Amino acid sequence: MLNNEATKYIWHPFTQMKTAAPPVQISRAKDCTLYAEDGTEYIDAIASWWVNIHGHCNEFIAGKIAAQAQTLEHVIFAGFTHTPAIDLAKTLISILPDHFAKVFFSDDGSTCVEVALKMAIQYWHNQGINHKTKIIAFENAYHGDTFGAMSVAERNAFNAAFNNYLFEVIHIPIPTNENIAALKLQVAAIAANDDVAAFIFEPLVQGAAGMLMYEPAHMDELLTIIKAKNILCIADEVMTGFGRTGKNFAIEYLKQQPDIICLSKGITGGFMPLGVTVCTQQIFVAFYADDTAKTFFHGHSYTANPLACAAANASMELLIADKCQQQIQHISTRHAAFARNIEKHIFIKEIRQRGTILAIELNTAENSSYFNSIQTAAYQYFMSNGLFLRPLGNIVYVMPPYCITDDELHKVYEVIKTSLDYLSQ
Ligand SMILES: Cc1ncc(COP(=O)(O)O)c(C=O)c1O
């Protein structure tokens, strides 16, 4: 009944409404547990699409939002500013690598990517450099669902309907030991005419693609060539940011640094939608002029919403505290031990880990893909065992809130372990 009411009025994201099982109605959540209306409990082992880094209903964050709501809930961010935004920008600049200088606010992962792409393109335009128009991105990339974000993504079933409307992008493979030499030559050839404006990448882990991972050393080699060609580099850390990879930001593994970074998801700990695009002073200066035409004409109604900024300030305070940093290392260590424990299982094709992200590629008869049919059976198995995981096709992955307890982690691993036998039958 509840579910009928839900689907009568609501169209759910990334959901084939005809064939999908009715949505599970969640009445409340605390830390890592989702409590369903029917009394069932689920461990949220993917932090609800990777956002709830501190678990659900964190009291510290909730308290800061409540206080902010009594003080200033919103004000237009053109011509006005406020302490929550100033504090957040200061904190982000202080925890990001030193060369970042300016924070631009938006609403979510897709919009902070749009902002990054527009910033990079206008950076050249503002300097009268109009021949730098090409964009390079990685194969298998996912950067969100708006048009710019879809354009820089892998062309696939997600965006097939819009193909004619997406701008042209040159896609290159992620760097590996095998292809790095050829890839450097390929990039040098692409950039030979000095007409590439920007390169966008998900550092070290391509999330939606199935948690595909690559090594920092290879990426440094690639970035060295790209930067030498005077191409702006955009790191999309919407998923990898805020501790996911074992460091606050995945780019901390790199020697070659991007000019722009996109952040969202974990920034507010799952309380409020918020995106930020952070750039260097060099980029900002290209917009800083007496000529109004050089303005960055971009802004959303809810830009730097004070409630979102208050949530983010609290989320950042929790993130940089020793307790959270230790938990990130602890989860990473436990993931690694579990990976060693199951890696020989016949139903595992590959197991990948970077920090708190653990991905298990199931060895099915079908190719590895988001549409691999094992997804449904795997999802049902996990749910019927009180574990919320949302496999990307045949890629089962764990990306838990950092507050997950040892007992909960143990349960996550046990259910995954038994699923391997069950699903391989
Ligand atoms: C790397 C990356 N960029 C951008 C996005 C889009 O974020 P949002 O869903 O908040 O628009 C995602 C979402 O999964 C992502 O993983």
Image (tube, helix red, strand yellow):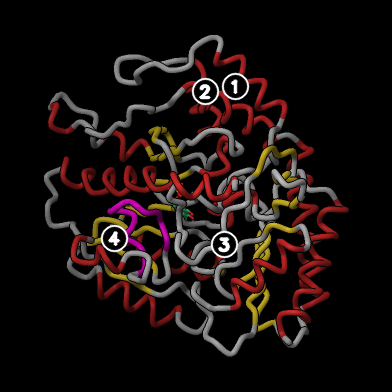
Q: Which mark is residue 151?
A: 4
Q: Which mark is residue 65?
A: 1
Q: Report how far apart the C-alphas of labels 4 and 2 lie in the structure.
A: 31 Å
* Residue, disc 3: 21
Residue located 45% across and 72% down the image = 174
Q: Position of residue 251 (x, y in %)?
A: 53, 53
- Say whether disc 4 or disc 3 marks the residue closer to the N-terminus: 3
As helix, strand or loop, the secondary structure at mark 3 comes to loop
**Apparent side of residue 170 relative to residue 6 in the rendered image (left or right):** left
Q: Report how far apart the C-alphas of labels 1 and 2 lie in the structure.
A: 6 Å
Q: Position of residue 289 (x, y in %)?
A: 19, 27
Amino acid type at circle 1 is: Ile
Identify the magenta region. 142-154
Q: What is the quadrant of the C terminus in the image?
A: bottom right
Image position of 374 with respect to 333: above or below: below
- Say whether disc 1 or disc 3 marks the residue closer to the N-terminus: 3
Residue located 74% across and 45% down the image = 32
Magenta stretch, main secondary structure, is: loop
Tag 1–tag 2 contact (CB < 8 Å): yes
* Residue, disc 2: 307
Viewer-proximal residue, 298 or 307? 307
Q: Quadrant of residue 9?
A: top left
- Say whether disc 4 or disc 2 marks the residue closer to the N-terminus: 4
Instruction: Check disc 1: other Cα within 10 Å, few if <14, some if 14-19, many if 20+.
Output: many
Amino acid type at circle 2 is: Leu
As helix, strand or loop, the secondary structure at mark 1 comes to helix
Q: Report how far apart the C-alphas of labels 1 and 3 lie in the structure.
A: 34 Å
Residue located 17% across and 33% down the image = 294
